Image (tube, helix red, strand yellow):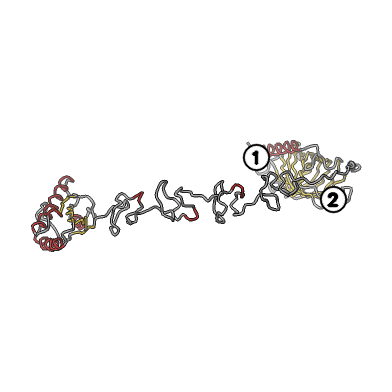
Amino acid sequence: MSKRKRILNFAISMALSSCAAATAAPMDDRWYLAPALSFIKADTNRDSKNGPGIRLGIGKAVSESWDIEANIVADRLSGKSGSSSYKQTGMGLDGLYFFTRDAAFSPYAVLGLGILNTKRAGESANAMANVGVGFKKALTDDDLALRADVRYRADFDDFQVAGQDYFGDWIVSVGLSLPLGEKTKPAPVAAIAPAVVAKPADSDGDGIFDSEDRCPDTPAGAKVDAHGCELDSDGDGVVDSKDKCPDTPQGAKVDQSGCELDSDGDGVVNSKDQCPETPAGAKVDARGCELDNDGDGVVDSKDKCPDTHKDAKVDANGCEVAEVIVLKGVNFETASDHLTPDSISILNGVAETLIRRPHIAIEVAGYTDSRGAASYNQELSQKRAQAVAKYLVSRGVKAENLTAKGYGEENPVADNKTAAGQAENRRVELHILTK
């Protein structure tokens, strides 16, 4: 759709909506004349200079907010660069929306449609639309008023300049609003019979008259304040007659009975609950925190090993974590479970320590790097763990305190892609199970 048609459709829709909004509640039912002088700032695409114009309108208020006004216009724009001048005449229908009607200053918006004839060779009358804003100020008690507005006028001229099929001019106008006829006088106000003064009533019998009673249905016998509303001594939002907990601390959240909330249902009210998200059914202490009977730092509902001794190191499940000792320097011959000579002296020292501590239970854990098949690595790690355990027994460590387990290539402690990492992963660990 061309720009010309879009603007025309918009103007028509606005005009129809303005007519639909008109009501039968006029501010002043007189017709008025609205003469005005104008200054036209011409469209820059048109080869012309700015020029003067005149406008004469006749209108009438149709509601408290709207005036309908018919206008005739005439203006002249001198040509530039030797071109001929533009003589334009036209007529239109405007809707004026008053934001407020005040004698001092009445601002309004205007929307209009009409036709405009540009007197140039080969041209005829064209559609035009205008929008703008202005104000009206009364000059006399009889509503003679000053009018001024600024409008943007779209002239859908069929004479094209630089491919433009319509011209947009800015128009500044100053004029008068001249009422016709006498102003309608307001209807006389009917005499009002003197009112019979009734005795003040107190429907709920709380000692506060109904006219001042903000709580007109107070229960009989309830204590009320100066507004007739029942007292709420502890300020928790529940009136005293319904408050089962009348001494609730200030600011505490309460239920419909006026008793403080216990959101997690552990029997400790929120203001005293230091652990407000205790699981349902969990046993808690006076602070509302779940019990930890074995003192290992894991609460009973999450403790899978509830009898752990107090000083034991435990995991997230409350179960004791075995202490791990890596036997650095304990090595084997390649692809074998035969200990190297350097490993013997290290294991001799380990045996002496374990003999001095016969109460310690040990798991000898063997690991390999990731080279080779996983099944082969598992079998080799088992043999190596058994070889270490067998040697420790031969040095006097109690066999019942030792277990051997091969983990193969599991739980690497270094990168198996490097020779150094592979060497670290080929290791033997002592897992201390009890002390």
Amino acid type shown at disc 2? Ala
Is residue 90 or residue 289 the one in the foreground? 289
Q: Which SS class for mark 2?
A: strand
Q: Quadrant of the C terminus?
A: bottom left
Res 128 visible: yes
Residue 137 locus on image (x, y percent): 82, 51
Left or right position of 163 against 185: left
Q: Look at 41% across and 52% down and name the residue there.
A: 284
The answer to which image quadrant residue 66 occupies is: top right
Answer few, some or many: residues within 10 Å of disc 2's Cα (few below 14, many 20 plus, some between 14 and 19): some
Query: Residue tagged by mark 2?
Result: 138
On the rendered structure, is 355 left or right of 180?
Answer: left
Please provide percent x and percent y for residue 89. 80, 41
Quarter of the image where the N terminus is located:
top right
Q: Do we see residue 70 in this rendering? A: no
Judging by the rendered image, the residue that carries numbered circle 1 is 3
Locate residue 332: give its quadrant: bottom left
> Label 1: how many residues lie within 10 Å, few (<14), some (14-19) or many (20+)?
few
Whichever of callouts 1 and 2 sits on the residue coming sooner in the sequence is 1
Give, as a three-letter code, the residue at label 1: Lys
Query: What x and y, as percent, mark residue 192?
Result: 88, 42
Find residue 362 and name its label. Answer: none
Q: Position of residue 302 (x, y in %)?
A: 35, 49
SS category of the residue bearing label 1: helix
Which of discs 1 and 2 lies nearer the camera? The answer is 2
